[in-house]
Every structure is written in structure tokens, then in C-alpha cells.
Amino acid sequence: MNGSPAKMGAGPVQPSPDAVHFLQAIEPEDLSLATFVDSLVTTSDTGKELGEFTVSIQYVKYKGDDAYLVHANSHGAIDNVPCGTSITAYVSPKLETLEQQHHEYVKLADHPLDRKTFIVLQDDKMVINKVVTQGEEVTRDAETFDLTTMKGFISEGSNLLLQRILVRKGLPATLSFLSFDSETNLCTTTYKSLEERTETVGKEEVRAVGIERTIHSTADLPTTWQSYFLTDGHLCNRVQVGSPVTMKLLRMPRIMEKDEPGERPVFKKKALDINEDMELFSMFLDRKDQLKNDHVMYMRHHPELQAILADFLQFLLLRKPDDIFPFAVDYFSSFSSQLPSHSPYAKSSEIPPKPQKVDTNLPPPPFP
């Protein structure tokens, strides 16, 4: 296992003040309007379908706190080589990455590549664990970043949520956040708006809002993606600059609309007369029959109930106690396994016997 030294304050990269302010200004409603599923197809430059790309965001609880679960999955085949990427991330309401798993693979026949990156927030640090498998060679690496150097950090998972919010709130200027490049080097990533354009989704022509995201790696060339969204944040087109692969939306989704507050309707209280309201009376009869049938069915399944009640009523009429409640308690306590066992019959018949007259003229007994 190869362990690189912990990166405490690695790199003099800083987010822009506008970017930090944008994250602090995110409201709960911005997040709730971003919780939906995107489903696109991956196509080549010739229009051939190569695979699928899906993104889902939903509200969850993470260790008891509010969070958002981001799941993205892209898989297909390019030049008959299977490849794919999957991301599962838990993100806070301020887009802080709480935990993320990022898996990438390319199944080359002679030299397959599999890369897994795990990010987890622990106390005041962000811990990164990487496992890279190339052929039969496995490399493991671990890094630690101090959170004081991670202000304005946007992971791949939180990026998917951020872009949906940017579309709705608008991107007034270029925003610069922090991110990781492909080798988990801390660097800047910029977001800037693109000119609106018309996209074809199914048989409809729709207006699309564009965002360009660029990761400025400190060790490699910049990587840029251009994405176009419907005005509610649904992704309709995405391409990595320089790649022949494009992701497209084929069917119009349900548009996420903002609820406008309005006056609450006032309903006057209406007196109900069951004898005049035929629908209400019919519901009453149906419910009555339902309860009756339910009770009859229960008694059929428990024939001992009728026998117990009949015995109690008969015993009650024979004894005719002045106070029925303690009499009933005594009677039914004999059926309980948690109370002392005694005979309610003996107790309820405790009538003092009449004194017998003693005949003193009787002869003595025949034995002492």
C-alpha cells in the first residue's frame, strides 16, 4: 500500500468570493426544486447510441442531519470497449461533500483499468482513499486535506446539484470554486454561462440554458464540459470538449414548477343531515354492513366468546349482585394467568350459614 503524505494546505488555490457567497445563499426551496431524475442517451458523433447517462438527486437523512443523495451512472461502449462511471455522494444543504464514492472503469482486453476514489468528511479533515487497478497491478493511496483549505470545494457529486441550482438562480458572472482533478490534486474549477440556444427534445423545440465547467488541473491540461439545461434544471445536452461522445435528452420530462403562494380558500361549514344526503346515508349503510360482517366473522372464528358471555350472564342472573363491576372483575379474573388463582364462584356465594341447633340429649359417640 502506497501512502502519500497528508496534504495540509496543499496548493495556493482559492475560490472566488462570489462563489463562496453563492453557496451561503442557497435556500431550501432551491434544493427542493432540484430533486428529480435525469435520463439521457449517449451518442457518437455519427448519431449511434452508445449507452445511457442518468442522474438522480433526492432528499435524505445522513447521520441524522438533512442531506441530499446524488447518484449518477454512465455506462456504454466506445469502439466496442465497455466503459463507465458511477458516482454516489451525500451532500449537505450548503453543498459540502459528506461522503462520495467515484468509480471509473475501461475494460480493455489486454489492459483493463479500474479506478475507485472514496471521499469522507471526518471531523475537521477530508480523507481521500484511492484504489487503482491496471491489469493485475493494484495501487492504493491515501490523502488528507485540512478543511481550512477546502472552503468552496465542489466534488463531482455536488457539481451535479450545483448546476441545477445555477440554472434556476442564474449565473451572473464566472464563478470559481475548488475541485479535484483526475489525480485528486486540489485545483480551481470555473463555471460560466453560455449563450442560450434551441434544443430539440423529442418533437419539441425548447429553449436551453448553457453552462461551461472547466477544471484547471495543476498537473495536466484543463478539462471542459459544456452542458445545456431546460429552464427548470433538467439536463438536455452534455459534451466534454474534444470528445466525440454527446449525451442527449430524448423525451420531455415533467417540468418542475415553483409553487406560487396564494390566498387559501375558505370553505363554509355545512351542516350534514344523513337523512337528506343520499350519498352520506349510503356510505353509512355500507360501513354498518362492513362492521357487522366483520364482527360476525370474528365470532365465527372464536366460538368460545359466545360460551364465555353466556356463562357470565347466566351466573350474573343467578347471583344478582348489587354491584355488577366488582362481580365481573372477580368472574373474569379466573381467566387470567397473571392473577392469583381463586374461585369466583366460591367468593360470590359467601353467604353466612345459619347456626345449627345442638341436641344435648344425644348419646355420646361410640369412640373417643
Image (tube, grey):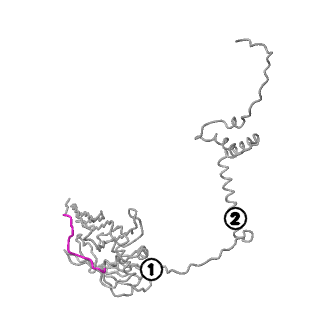
> Closer to the camera, 39 or 298?
298
- Give the crowd class for mark 2: few <14, some 14-19, many >=20 residues within 10 Å: few
Q: Residue furthest front?
A: 360
Say whether disc 1 or disc 2 marks the residue closer to the N-terminus: 1
User: Which quarter of the picture shows residue 127?
Assistant: bottom left
> Closer to the camera, 112 or 183?
183
Residue at x-position 21% and y-position 67%: 8
- Magenta segment: 5-18
In the rendered structure, the answer to whether residue 220 lies left or right of residue 120 reads: left
Asked whether 6 falls inside the magenta stretch, the response is yes
User: Which quarter of the picture shows residue 229?
Assistant: bottom left
> Closer to the camera, 191 or 324?
324
Asked whether 16 falls inside the magenta stretch, the response is yes
- Where residue 261 appears, as percent x and y from the top left, is 51, 80
- Report the quarter where the N terminus lies: bottom left
Give the amino acid at mark 1. Answer: Met
In this figure, which residue is indicated by the disc labeled 1? 252
In the rendered structure, the answer to whether residue 213 lies left or right of residue 58 reads: left
Q: Is residue 296 above or below residue 182?
A: above
- Where residue 13 appears, as percent x and y from the top left, is 22, 75
Q: Is residue 125 above or below residue 241?
A: above
Q: Secondary structure at mark 1?
A: loop
Circle number at residue 356: none
In this figure, which residue is indicated by the disc labeled 2? 284
- Where residue 65 appears, as percent x and y from the top left, is 39, 65
Residue at x-position 21% and y-position 69%: 9
Q: Is residue 364 above or below residue 59?
A: above
